[in-house]
Image (spheres, coloured by chain):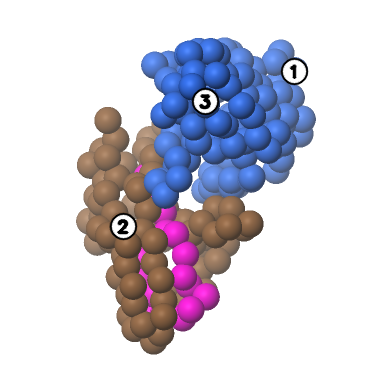
Chain colours: A blue, B brown
Amino acid sequence: DAKTTQPPSMDCAEGRAANLPCNHSTISGNEYVYWYRQIHSQGPQYIIHGLKNNETNEMASLIITEDRKSSTLILPHATLRDTAVYYCIVPHGSFQKLVFGTGTRLLVSP
Amino acid sequence: DVKVTQSSRYLVKRTGEKVFLECVQDMDHENMFWYRQDPGLGLRLIYFSYDVKMKEKGDIPEGYSVSREKKERFSLILESASTNQTSMYLCASNTGLRGNQPQHFGDGTRLSIL
């Protein structure tokens, strides 16, 4: 099962890009990387996922390295409402259960 | 947008009570999940259902049961509540028709057992 490693915390100025890194060096060839975030007292919110190509949606961009051992979530113009804990996850098992680690606590400041 | 609705945001019950947590999704998803989230322990899977009346145990099913009588509804039951079941309970769903689809979560039920 692929384990992920993220920095415990990051700061970002409002309006700037937030780049959140994740290491998943033991990922298998057919395993996807998912990103979720959780704002205090709310349920986790799905952001984006990918296999090997870079992905973009209305919320964020996901850059996956060619060897797939790491990825970066990019919030292009961070707002105060992006302050949250961000989780990088590689689901495993037949149920594709999600296992959240400690994540990265992103603080966006004015 | 996917909508997963949990019946209560906050719930307080007493030890020994039978507790029902309800979850409804509006996206016709085949798969539904119940997790609990505790500080320092992260997210843990309690039960999973991949179809009506079908269920699979997750990592921590002891003390819990589930019911899926209709596709859109997945209920978690605490047979005899205990204080160690005080936690945040999260319901999620995703489609089983295509692989690798994200799970979408409700806002959670913060359950306190006194």
Residue at 31% across / 42% down in the picture? B29
Please, is residue B40 above or below residue A38 in the view?
below
Give how far across and how far down residue A77 sits, in percent. 47, 14
Q: Residue furthest front?
A: A110
Would residue A42 be found to the left or right of residue A88 on screen? left
Residue at 44% across / 33% down in the picture? A46
Residue under numbered circle 3: A109
Residue under numbered circle 1: A67
Asked if one can make out residue B99 in the rendered structure from this viewpoint, the answer is no
Give how far across and how far down residue B71 sits, in percent. 25, 51
What amino acid is at disc 2? Arg
The chain under label 3 reads: A
Residue at 52% across / 25% down in the picture? A109
Name the one closer to the observer, B67 or A13.
A13
Kindly report the distance in space between the C-alpha atoms of the residues bearing marks 2 and 3: 29 Å
Q: Quadrant of the N terminus of chain A?
A: top right
Mark 2 or 3, which is nearer the eye? 3
Name the one closer to the observer, B67 or B38.
B38
Please, is residue B77 above or below residue B114 in the view?
above
Kindly report the distance in space between the C-alpha atoms of the residues bearing marks 1 and 3: 34 Å
Q: Which residues are magenta?
A: B76-93
Count neighbours of disc 1 (C-alpha within 10 A) and say few if under 14, some if 14 to 19, many if 20 or more: few
Mark 1 or 3, which is nearer the eye? 3
Count neighbours of disc 3 (C-alpha within 10 A) and say few if under 14, some if 14 to 19, many if 20 or more: some
What amino acid is at disc 3? Ser
Give how far across and how far down residue B5 sits, in percent. 27, 49
Q: Report the disc number at residue B9.
A: 2
Would residue A27 be found to the left or right of residue B5 on screen? right
Residue B41 placement: quadrant: bottom right
Mark 2 or 1, which is nearer the eye? 2
- The local secondary structure at tag 2 comes to loop
